[in-house]
Each structure stands twice: as structure tokens, then as C-alpha cells.
Image: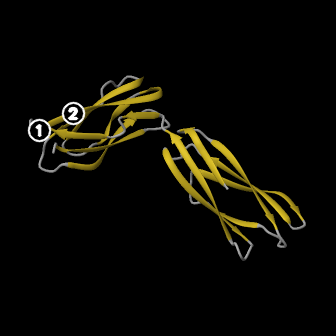
């Protein structure tokens, strides 16, 4: 059994349920739930208890602060069954960002003049503002464009050749979008081979 939160928007809450059933001679119970994820709330509710049959409903609620992107979480249920003391329940998330970056990463290769640039498009579901650049690696310049609220922003990223290439760095742009106050763009820059 698994639970899937697929196609959710960032900042959106949702709830899924999973029924767990036991058939056997024990007075089977779920005695504890281990949930290390602050963006998931987990509730265990008894459904029925008959001779040699027990049923539980597991409710999992996705919180507003769930991470953007694809992720997999594991909830561990401890039972009183000696031969199977733990049950794992997989929770899959596919959370769509409020602001989509295209292309998703920047690869700048300087030519003979030592310079390179690339334009990035930020597309929001609602109008938003780019408040500024929170973080950028040395040798990189970022021009965020308009500071007016709009659905589409064009950001220009520039690189000028230097002794040390930029490897596996991140540009962070601050926005006024409540669901996505930071937009992170991976960047690599250096000389063209």
C-alpha cells in the first residue's frame, strides 16, 4: 500500500487514506506511527475489530509547506505482531511549483571574447514580482528585469570568463509569491571546450 499526492500545486493541502486489514489469531494493533516529515500529518483510526479480523484507516494530510518537486517519504507503523513488528507505507509527492523556470538550469560557455549570457523565463500562475537577487556565484551577473507584478518575467544571466569556472552553483531570486518566496536556478559556467 502507498499514498500518492500527484499533480498538487505548491501551497495546496490534500488528504489521502489507506485501509489496513489484518486477518489472524492475534489481537493485532498499530501501536505507534513514526513520521519524521513536518509537512505530513498522520492519523490512525480503527475501522472494525471482529474475531480474527482487524481494520484500520490511515489518513495522511499533505501540508502547505510540502517541498516542491518529486519526492518519496516513508512512514513506519509499529505493530504488536512479533513476526512483523514494522510496516512501511510509502508516500509519493509530485508538487508543482507556483513559478516555473525555463530552462530549468543555466549552462554558460564563454566563447573567444570570454563572455556568455542566457535568458531565463519565469512563469507564474498568478502575477508576482521579482524582488531581487538573494544569491549568485562570483563571476555571474543577474538582471532580474521588471519589478512590476506580472505572470511572466525574463531574467538575463551573464558570465565573464575568469580563472575559476563556476561549477554546481545556484542563483536564488526572491519573489513576493507566498507559495514560492525563493526561486533557485542551478548554474554552471566556464570556457567552451
Q: How many marks?
A: 2
Q: Nearer the viewer, residue 31 or 102?
A: 102
Q: Residue at x 83, y 70 (%)?
A: 24
Residue depicted at x 64% and y 54%: 2
Residue 65 image point, x, y percent: 54, 45
Q: Position of residue 42 (x, y in %)?
A: 67, 54
Residue position marked by numbered label 1 in the rendering = 114
Q: Which residue is mark 2?
A: 117
**Residue at the spot 40% in from the left edge and 40% down from the top edge:** 182
Vertically, is 101 above or below 17?
above
- Near mark 2 (Cα within 10 A), the count class, few <14, some 14-19 or many ≥20, is some
**Image side of residue 133 versus residue 38, left or right:** left
Residue 149 vs residue 170: left or right? Answer: right
Residue 143 drawn above or below residue 62: above
Q: Which mark is residue 129?
A: none
Q: Going by the picture, which residue comes out furthest to the right?
A: 51
Q: Give the colouring mode of the picture.
A: secondary structure
Pick the residue in front: 19 or 12. Answer: 19
> Helix, strand or loop at disc 2?
strand
Asked if residue 127 lies left or right of residue 82, the reply is: left
Quadrant of the rendered image containing residue 155: top left
Considering the image in quadrants, where does the C terminus appear?
top left
- Label 1 and label 2: CA atoms lie apart by 11 Å
Q: Residues within 10 Å of mark 1 (few under 14, many from 20)?
A: some
The image quadrant that residue 51 belongs to is bottom right
Q: Residue furthest front?
A: 193
Amino acid at each position: 500500500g502507498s499514498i500518492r499526492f500527484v499533480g498538487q500545486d505548491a501551497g495546496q493541502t490534500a488528504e489521502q487514506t489507506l485501509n489496513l486489514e489484518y486477518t489472524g489469531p492475534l489481537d493485532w494493533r498499530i501501536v505507534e506511527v513514526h513520521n519524521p516529515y513536518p509537512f505530513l500529518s498522520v492519523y490512525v483510526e480503527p475501522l472494525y475489530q471482529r474475531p480474527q479480523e482487524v481494520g484500520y484507516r490511515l489518513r495522511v494530510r499533505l501540508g502547505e509547506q510540502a517541498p516542491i518537486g518529486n519526492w518519496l517519504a516513508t512512514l513506519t507503523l509499529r505493530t504488536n505482531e512479533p513476526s512483523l513488528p514494522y510496516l512501511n507505507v510509502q508516500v509519493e509527492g509530485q508538487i508543482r511549483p507556483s513559478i516555473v523556470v525555463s530552462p530549468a538550469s543555466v549552462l554558460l560557455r564563454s566563447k573567444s571574447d570570454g563572455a556568455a549570457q542566457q535568458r531565463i523565463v519565469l512563469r507564474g500562475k498568478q502575477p508576482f514580482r521579482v524582488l531581487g537577487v538573494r544569491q549568485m556565484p562570483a563571476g555571474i551577473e543577474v538582471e532580474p528585469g521588471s519589478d512590476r507584478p506580472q505572470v511572466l518575467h525574463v531574467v538575463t544571466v551573464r558570465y565573464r570568463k575568469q580563472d575559476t569556472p563556476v561549477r554546481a552553483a545556484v542563483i536564488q531570486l526572491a519573489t513576493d509569491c507566498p507559495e514560492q518566496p525563493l526561486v533557485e536556478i542551478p548554474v554552471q559556467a566556464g570556457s567552451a571546450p
